[in-house]
Image (spheres, helix red, strand yellow):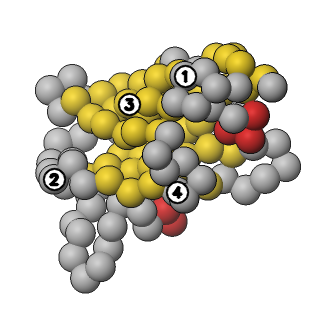
Amino acid sequence: QVQLVESGGGSVQAGGSLRLSCAASGYTSTNYCLAWFRQAPGKEREGVAGIYSRSGSTRYADSVKGRFTISQDNAKNTLYLQMNSLKPEDTAMYYCAAFLPAYLYFGTTCGDWNRYNYWGQGTQVTISS
C-alpha cells in the first residue's frame, strides 16, 4: 500500500519561505516520479514540480520556476519542496503525489501531470500580503 504523508505547511507572509516534506512508503519500484501539486479554492489542481527517482531530473510549472526547488532523499524516502519568495497566489492545499511505476520512454516526463496515480492528503499553505 503506497502511502504519502505531507508535512510542513503553514502560514507566512509574502516574501517568506516554507519547506514541505513528504514521507513516502509502501513500494519497491526504483522507477517512479514524485511530485507536488496544489489546489487553490475554486481552481483546478495543478502540477507544481516533479522529480524522477533514478536521475533526479526535475520539471517545474512556469509559475514557480526560480522560486521553488524540489528534491528527494532516497535514503529516507522523503520528498521536499523548498518554497522561497512566496506570493499570496501560492496559497493552496499542497499535495504530494507519485507516478508509479514510471518508465520515462518516448517523451514521457515527470511533468506529465495526468499520470500521477497515488496521492497524499495534503498540507495547507497560506501566504498573507
Quarter of the picture holding the N terminus: top left
**Element under disc 2:** loop
Badge 1 amino acid:
Ser
- Asked if residue 25 can be seen in this view, the reply is no
Mark 4 vs mark 1: which is more N-terminal? 1
Residue 12: % across, % down: 67, 17
Residue for badge 2: 55
Badge 3 amino acid:
Tyr
**Element under disc 1:** loop
**Element under disc 3:** strand
Tell me what residue is drawn at x 50 percent, y 40 percent: 67
What's the CA distance linking mark 3 and mark 2?
Answer: 16 Å
Residue 65: % across, % down: 49, 50
Q: Are marks 4 and 1 in contact (CB under 8 Å)?
A: no
Residue for badge 1: 17
Residue for badge 3: 80
User: What mark, if any, has residue 1 been given in the picture?
Assistant: none
Quarter of the picture holding the C terminus: top right
Q: Are marks 3 and 2 in contact (CB under 8 Å)?
A: no
